[in-house]
Amino acid sequence: MTSGGSWRRRAVVVLAVASISLVAAFRDVLIDYFMTKPNVTRENDANTEYDASKLPFTVSVQPEKGDPRQQWVMVLDRELTAAETRKLTSSHDSSVTFAYLKSLGGRLLEYPSVLEHAPKQYTQHMSTGRTELSDTFKMTVLSTRAAAVVIDNWKVTDVVCRKSTAQTVVAYPPQGGAVYQGIQLHVPSHADEPVLTDDTEGQGEPYFDTHYIEVGGGQPSGGLRVEAIAPRGQSCEWGVEVHYVDAYQKAQWLQLKDRKGQPLRLRTESVPLRPRQEWFFGSTPWTPCHLKPKEPACDLL
């Protein structure tokens, strides 16, 4: 009897210990279950707050490099010497000419997209009788946010224009109209600019009426090719404000800044009204339009 009672007591003890362990384990499971959701919520809230505290986006701007074989215009702040003129006009290769002018400090301008399908209310702004030229650049928008940021509007700000310092113009004109994907605007802006330049439905319409730029949320970058057109004879500096909406219900206008945190200033140049030297280079031999302004080719400058 004693031996059997002892065994039973040990069994009861073992069962009691096992029950206590099970209760403790179940308690831990319950604690983990009820604590996990608050912890996850707090972590998600912290991640959201951190993401929302980041800059919505940053921008970088790169001037268009141009294609030496396509249409282009170069401007220089001085006259070419006799030796430079001889070297310039001795070449009939547009790529060689392009590289040579670059080496002399030439700055690139381009013939903007021909908006044949734009609405009349836009094209009437451009009936000045003179060829317009664009100072073209590519703007890249970058974001490290986990949630999406959408830029849905843009406006030119703080425009300051001065007389162009250019004295020499060399033009390699287009053989026909061309269209490039991106946007076009004048400085100062015309109504409803920037407009869409793509050769599609909507050409010449306000870009942000039907388009937007989305970054963040797994799409780290976006960008635009921008054709900026200054008044003839002027060189202008200007800034940009964009309107954005993010995933945290924040919507506001933001002044674009450069990498140093200063307001972004963009420079848009045009050809001078009365250049001292003006050369036409294309299907016809070199034409000095400053000496022969009535030559038909000179109308393309």
Image (tube, helix red, strand yellow):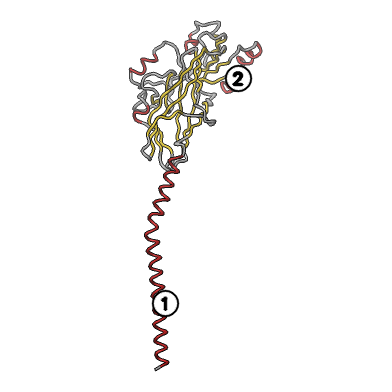
Q: Nearer the viewer, residue 187 or 8?
A: 8
SS of the residue at dot 1? Answer: helix
Amino acid beneath label 1: Val
Establish if 3 lies above or below 181.
Answer: below
Report which residue position mark 1 lands on. Answer: 17
- Toward the viewer: 88 or 221? 221
Q: Residue at x 57, y 8 (%)?
A: 276
- Quadrant including the N terminus: bottom left
Q: Residue furthest bottom?
A: 1
User: Which residue in the protein does label 2 denote?
Assistant: 105
Q: Please tell me the numbered disc located at residue 233.
A: none
Residue 106, position as x, y percentages in the image = 58, 19
- Residue 67 versus residue 164 in the image, above or below: below
Relative to the observer, which residue lies in front, 276 or 17?
17
* Pointer 2 with pointer 1, Cβ within 8 A: no
Residue at the spot 33% in from the left edge and 17% down from the top edge: 121
Q: Can you say whether 68 is above or below 291 in the image?
A: below
Q: Is residue 245 above or below residue 68?
A: below
Query: Which residue of the protein is positioned furthest toward the right in this rendering?
Result: 83
Q: Secondary structure at mark 2?
A: loop
**Mark 1 packing: few (<14 Cα in 10 Å), some, or many (20+)?**
few
- 2 or 1: tag closer to the N-terminus: 1
Residue 288 in the image, given as x and y percentages of width and height: 56, 9
What x and y, as percent, mark residue 178?
44, 23
Q: Quadrant of residue 201?
A: top left
Number of numbered markers:
2
Q: CA distance from mark 2 to mark 1?
A: 90 Å
Quarter of image, res 82: top right
| Mark 2 or mark 1, whichever is nearer to me | 1
Three-letter code, disc 2: Gly
Q: Is disc 2 surrounded by few (<14), some (14 to 19) or many (20+) residues within 10 Å?
A: few
Where does the image place residue 206, in percent across and percent down from the top left?
A: 36, 25
